[in-house]
């Protein structure tokens, strides 16, 4: 009897752990808002001539505003050689992410462990692709910590 109870408890514990892991991985769910403003030092920023960091001279910003049909997302990031990524996109919630589809590809934002991560799945962010970044900048992998939330 005790052996069966131990096995049952182990099974229930593992199932609960798996469910909680899936929820943490998936990010925002229905009822959890994405809205907010985030700001942080432009950690990828370098000066054009010297290549020195200019992280403290510029700030990366992400603004997410809830609208009736989804979210308006604005991003501005200063990166290598002070090239910029900047966009305003309408995004829809889908499977725990914010999604924007275009002819060039998909841009997504997901939330995991207090971090918002932008991904573009390898789509060219420059004028040849999505058209939101200079030649030495990229949106794929940009992260904004919830500790940088200002609104």
Image (cartoon, grey):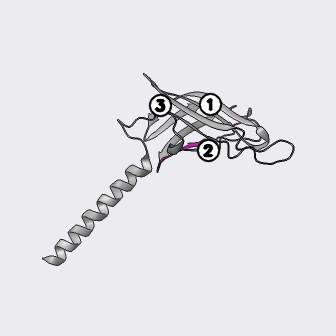
Residue 142 has which mark? Answer: 2
Residue 76 spot, x, y in % from top left: 65, 33
Mark 2 or 3, which is nearer the eye?
2
Would you identify the image quadrant in which residue 8 lies? bottom left
Q: Is residue 48 left or right of residue 103?
A: right
Other residues around mark 1 within 10 Å, as few (<14) / some (14–19) / many (≥20): few
Element on which disc 1 rests: loop
N-terminal of the pair, mark 2 or mark 1, is: 1
Q: Magenta region's main secondary structure?
A: loop
Residue 2 spot, x, y in % from top left: 15, 77
Residue farthest to the right, as pictured: 49
Element on which disc 3 rests: strand
Other residues around mark 3 within 10 Å, as few (<14) / some (14–19) / many (≥20): some
Query: CB of mark 1 within 8 Å of CB of mark 3?
Result: no
Would you identify the image quadrant in which residue 102 lies? top right
**Residue closer to the observer: 102 or 71:** 71
Residue 6 is a magenta residue: no
Residue range in magenta is: 114-126
Residue 125 is a magenta residue: yes
Disc 2 to disc 3, C-alpha distance: 19 Å
**Residue closer to the observer: 19 or 50:** 50
Element on which disc 2 rests: loop
Other residues around mark 2 within 10 Å, as few (<14) / some (14–19) / many (≥20): some
N-terminal of the pair, mark 1 or mark 3, is: 3
Residue farthest to the top, as pictured: 68
Disc 1 designates what residue?
A: 103
Mark 2 or 1, which is nearer the eye?
2
Query: Vertical placement of 20 versus 56: above or below?
Result: below
Q: Residue at x 54, y 39 (%)?
A: 108
Disc 3 designates what residue?
A: 92
């Amino acid at each position: 009897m005790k052996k069966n109870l131990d096995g049952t408890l182990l099974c229930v514990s593992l199932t609960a752990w798996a469910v909680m892991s899936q929820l943490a991985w998936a990010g925002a769910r229905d009822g959890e808002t994405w809205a907010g403003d985030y700001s942080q030092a432009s950690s990828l920023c370098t000066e054009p001539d010297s290549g020195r960091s200019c992280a403290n001279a510029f700030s990366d910003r992400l603004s997410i505003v809830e609208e009736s049909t989804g979210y308006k997302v604005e991003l501005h990031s200063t990166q290598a050689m002070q090239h910029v990524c900047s966009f305003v996109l309408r995004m829809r919630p889908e499977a725990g992410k914010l999604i924007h589809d275009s002819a060039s590809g998909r841009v997504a934002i997901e939330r995991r462990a207090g971090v918002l991560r932008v991904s573009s799945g390898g789509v060219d962010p420059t004028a040849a692709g999505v058209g939101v970044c200079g030649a030495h900048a990229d949106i794929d992998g940009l992260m904004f910590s919830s500790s940088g939330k200002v609104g």
